[in-house]
Every structure is written in structure tokens, then in C-alpha cells.
Image (tube, rainbow, N blue to C red):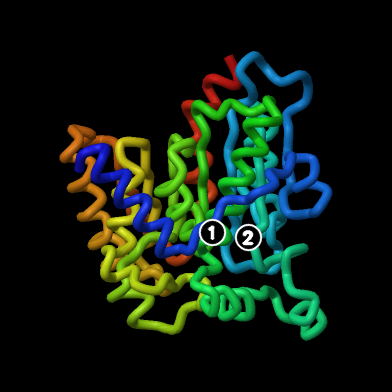
């Protein structure tokens, strides 16, 4: 796919999402104060060029941005993977997906619900927007704030998302070339195996998407940047067969650009999991840089 064709596809995807840019960019300190983002920084002064940085995005979890530092399933070597990365020299940025944590609707919180996805998705569909588009906009705004902050190395930025967080990370990376390495943890499939086969949260749905393509076609827009898909053979949310099928479109796009190793599919023996050990290993290049 040529750069011009890819740009047109990105613009088309943005229209489907109902993506709107923020008119008043906010600084990172404001996002933190509003409890939309949590940031873990290594001790000491930021190196020249900024800290190597990982943005970790939670899935459908009441933990919100605390997921990668508090959920039992994200521990490696007896500690949360987010804290291990921080201790290894990474800046770790933990956003809350819109509809979780502080961004929930107060009425849903009063009802004891874990998120406001359904409410927000229905509201946005009425005006030609999508909740997924709002989450993409939030991530774009986050990267804008990180650029303004100056402590983050944006040239080697890694974004990793688990499950629904991976969905947001995928569509964001397709629309925002500042993501240099996208890691999808149990977050890839086709509509046939997932959205059309089982009941999913409304926040995953984008009107007219299948006339555009499928999730694999969205992932193809990440090319030629690095893309790693980590997926369990026993995943019951996004079945493994669908993940492999989606990767076919991804592989084709990368091969067309001569990037035979740019996109990697790492099959795992488990189910629908965040695979923190694999994430830890994938950050090895950054770890080497941060500790030498």
C-alpha cells in the first residue's frame, strides 16, 4: 500500500470512528490531577531525550489505570510489571479508558457498575460518534501532553494494550504514527469469530467498519512500524483462530513494504490473559538501553 493510499485509509477510519481532535489541549499534570492518567517515573533526572516510555492500557477492569500495577495477573518476579519497568528505567504511563475510573458517569457509579461503556457508546452513536473514537482521541491528547512535557522519549514509544485496552491501542496506533511499537495482548481477532459470534461490550463496535475492512485491516495501517501480537491458543473472548486469520491481512501489508519481520504473532498456551512475562521480555531492547 502506498503512503498516499494508507493516508486515505487512515482518514476514512477516523471518519468511521467519529474522531474529533481536542480544541483545548491539556497538560499531563492536568490529566494526572483529573485522575485520567497515572504516571510512574524512575528515580533521578530524566536523561537527555527523555525516558524510554511505555504506555500500558488496561482492559475491561474495575482497576482502571491501576490494573498494570495492582491486578494479580500482571505480576512478574513477584512484582507488578508496571513497577518493574519503572525500576528498570522506563517511564510508565497508565491511562484510564473513557468510561472507567474517574471518567465514569456518576449515575453508573451510584448503581455499583464497573464502567459506563454502554451508556457512553449509546450517547455517542446518536450524534455520529463512537466511544472507541473518543478513546482514540483521549490517547492522542495524552501523547500531545507527553510531547509538551518533554520527559518522554517519543521516538521509541511503546504502547501495549490488554483486551479492550488493546482495541483502543490498535485503533489509536492506526491513526497516530507516534506509536513506534504496538503490543496487543489478547486483543486481536476478526468480526466473524468475535463481534458477530458472541456478545461483546458496545464500546467495541464501529458502524460501517466491515465495509472498511476488519481488525486485521486496521492493524495493517500500523505498518511499517513494529507490531507484536501476543495471543493465547485457549482465548475464549477473542478466539485464537480469529486472531490468526486477522494476522494474515497484517502480514500481507508488512510484506508489501518489504518488512517481513515488522509484524510478529506470538502464540501462547494460555487463554485470555495479559501475559506480563511476555510483555516484560518484549521490552528487553528498552531495558538494555535504560540500564547501560
Does residue 67 show up?
A: yes
Q: Which residue is at a point 70% across and 47% down the rendered structure image? A: 24
Query: Under tag 2, what secondary structure?
Result: loop
Specify whether 196 is left or right of 147: left
Residue with the mark numbered 2? 97
Q: Do the residues labelled 2 and 1 touch (CB within 8 Å)?
A: yes
Q: Where is residue 120 in the image (x, y as percent from the top left)?
A: 62, 75
Identify the residue at image location x=80%, y=53%: 34
Point 63% across, 60% down: residue: 97
Which quarter shows the N terminus? top left
Q: Can you say whether 68 is above or below 193 in the image?
A: above
- Quarter holding the C terminus is top right
Rendered location of residue 268, percent (x, y): 37, 55
Vertical comparison of 77 with 216: above or below:
above
Mark 1, Cα crowd under 10 Å, few <14 / some 14-19 / many 20+, is many
Is residue 62 rendered to the left or right of residue 4?
right
Q: How far apart are marks 2 and 1 (CA)?
A: 7 Å
Residue 78 seen in this snapshot: no
Question: Is label 1 in a helix, a strand or a loop?
Answer: helix
Q: Nearer the viewer, residue 53 or 220?
A: 220
| Picture residue at 63% right of the left edge, 28% below the top | 152
The answer to whether residue 30 is left or right of residue 129 is right
Would you place residue 237 above or below residue 288 in this image? Answer: below
Relative to 6, is 249 above or below? below
Residue underneath mark 1: 165
Quarter of the image where one finds residue 104: bottom right
- Comes first in the chain, label 2 or label 1: 2
Amino acid at each position: 500500500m502506498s503512503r498516499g493510499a494508507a493516508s486515505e485509509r487512515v482518514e476514512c477510519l477516523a471518519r468511521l470512528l467519529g474522531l474529533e481532535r481536542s480544541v483545548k489541549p491539556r497538560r499531563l499534570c492536568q490529566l494526572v490531577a483529573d485522575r485520567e492518567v497515572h504516571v510512574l517515573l524512575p528515580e533521578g533526572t530524566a536523561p537527555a531525550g527523555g525516558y524510554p516510555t511505555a504506555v500500558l492500557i488496561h482492559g475491561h477492569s474495575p482497576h482502571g489505570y491501576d490494573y498494570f500495577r495492582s491486578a494479580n495477573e500482571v505480576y512478574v518476579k513477584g512484582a507488578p510489571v508496571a513497577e518493574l519497568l519503572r525500576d528498570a528505567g522506563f517511564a510508565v504511563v497508565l491511562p484510564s479508558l473513557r468510561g472507567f475510573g474517574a471518567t465514569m458517569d456518576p449515575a453508573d457509579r451510584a448503581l455499583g457498575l464497573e464502567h459506563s461503556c454502554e451508556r457512553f457508546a449509546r450517547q455517542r452513536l446518536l450524534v455520529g460518534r463512537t466511544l472507541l473514537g473518543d478513546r482514540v482521541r483521549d490517547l492522542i491528547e495524552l501523547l500531545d501532553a507527553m510531547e509538551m512535557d518533554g520527559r518522554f522519549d517519543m521516538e521509541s514509544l511503546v504502547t501495549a494494550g490488554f483486551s479492550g485496552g488493546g482495541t483502543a491501542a490498535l485503533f489509536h496506533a492506526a491513526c497516530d504514527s507516534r506509536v513506534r511499537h504496538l503490543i496487543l495482548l489478547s486483543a486481536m481477532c476478526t468480526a466473524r469469530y468475535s463481534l458477530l459470534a458472541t456478545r461483546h461490550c458496545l464500546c467495541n463496535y464501529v458502524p460501517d467498519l466491515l465495509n472498511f475492512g476488519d481488525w486485521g485491516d486496521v492493524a495493517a495501517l500500523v505498518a511499517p512500524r513494529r507490531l507484536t501480537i501476543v495471543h493465547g491458543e485457549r482465548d475464549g473472548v477473542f478466539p485464537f483462530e480469529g486472531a490468526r486469520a486477522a494476522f494474515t491481512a497484517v502480514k500481507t501489508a508488512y510484506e508489501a513494504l518489504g518488512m517481513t519481520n515488522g509484524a510478529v504473532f506470538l502464540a501462547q498456551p494460555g487463554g485470555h490473559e495479559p501475559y506480563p512475562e511476555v510483555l516484560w521480555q518484549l521490552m528487553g531492547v528498552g531495558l538494555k538501553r535504560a540500564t547501560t
